[in-house]
Amino acid sequence: MLEGKVAVITGASRGIGRAVALEMARCHATVIVNYNGSEERARGVQEEIEALGGKAEICQCDVSDFAACGEFIQRVIQNYGRIDILVNNAGITRDGLLMKMSEEDFDRVLDTNLKGTFHCVRFASRQMLKQRAGRIINLSSVSGVMGNAGQANYSASKAGVIGLTKAAARELASRHITVNAIAPGFIETDMTDALADSVKEEAVKQIPLGAFGKPEDVAHLAVFLASEQAGYITGQVIHVDGGMAM
Ligand code: NAP
C-alpha cells in the first residue's frame, strides 16, 4: 500500500507513534523513527521494523526546536531524496488546574504539540511542494475538540493543531498535498497510563464503546490517510475515540 514511500513519524519511540511506524513499515514504507529522549526505545522500534523485513532509521530531534527541525528534515531529504508522509505525533501533557498552571507548563505543551507540528510542516511541506505530492497527518485530540478540565494547555494546543491542519490543507491543496488531523480519545499508552485509576474509571464511562482504544486503532487510520486511496480527503478531523465526541 505504501511501497516506495518515505514516512517521517515524530515521537515514534513509544505509544501511538510506534504503532504508526510499525503499521507503515508493514505496508512497505521506509520509516524515519523520530524520538526526543528515548533512544533505546526508538532503536527497539527500528529493530522490530527490520525484523518484519522493513526499512527504518532512528533520528533524534526535539520538535519544539525550530532550527533542529530544519536540520532533521534536511537530513531526511539528503538521505532519501524525498518525504512522502509526515505524521506529527510527538506530544506531551503537563496537566493542572488553570488557576495553578505555571507559564512554563503552558509554554512547554504549546511548544511541543502545536509549534512542533508547525515546525515539521513548515520544513517538510517545502519538499512536498517540489514533489507536487504529499500526505501530512497531525495528531490532535478529543480534548482539543471538546475541551477537558485540567488540560487548558493541552486542549489549547490540540485545538491549535486543528486550525493549523485546516489552514495548511487549504494552502497546500493545489499541489496535491493533503493535510488531515486525527483526534483520538483515550488510547492505551504511557500518556494515559499515568492517569489515576479513578480518572480512568470516570473516563471509560464517557466512552460509548466502553473501553480505551489501542495504538493500532489510530495507526490503521493513519495508514489509510497516507495511502493513495485517501487522495480526495483533506482538511478533516477524524475521531478515533469509541464515540466520545459525536
Ligand atoms: P506517549 O506514549 O507519551 O509518547 C509520546 C511520544 O512523543 C514519545 O515517542 C516521545 O519521545 C515523543 N516526544 C515527546 N516530546 C517530544 C519532543 N519534544 N520532540 C520529539 N518527540 C517528542 O504519547 P501517546 O499517547 O502515544 O501520544 C501520541 C500523540 O497522540 C500525542 O500527540 C498525544 O497528544 C496524542 N493523543 C494521545 C491520546 C492518548 O490517549 N494516548 C489521546 C489523544 C491524543 P521520547 O520518548 O523520545 O521522549
Image (cartoon, rainbow, N blue to C red):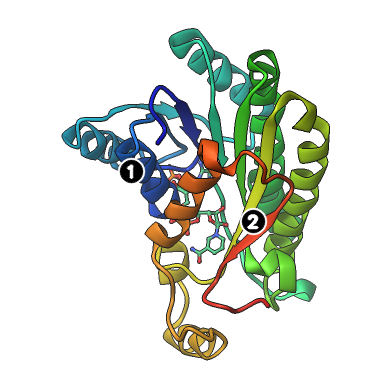
Q: Secondary structure at mark 1?
A: helix
Q: Decide which of 96, 42 is in the foreground and name it.
A: 42
Q: Position of residue 116 (x, y in %)?
A: 65, 39
Could you tell which of marks 2 and 1 lies nearer the N-terminus?
Answer: 1
For the point 72% across and 36% down, the residue is 118
Looking at the image, residue 218 sits to the left or right of residue 19; the answer is: right
Against 55, residue 17 (above or below) is below
Q: Which residue is mark 1?
A: 22
Q: Decide which of 239, 230 is in the foreground and name it.
A: 230
Badge 2 amino acid: Ser
Q: Which residue is mark 2?
A: 140
Could you classify mark 1 by the number of other residues whose Cα lies within 10 Å: few (under 14), some (14-19), or many (20 or more)?
many
Q: Would you say residue 106 is visible in this rendering?
A: no
**Would you say the beta carbon of the disc 2 residue lies within 8 angstroms of ligand 1?**
yes
For the point 47% across and 38% down, the residue is 36
Against 166, residue 122 (above or below) is above
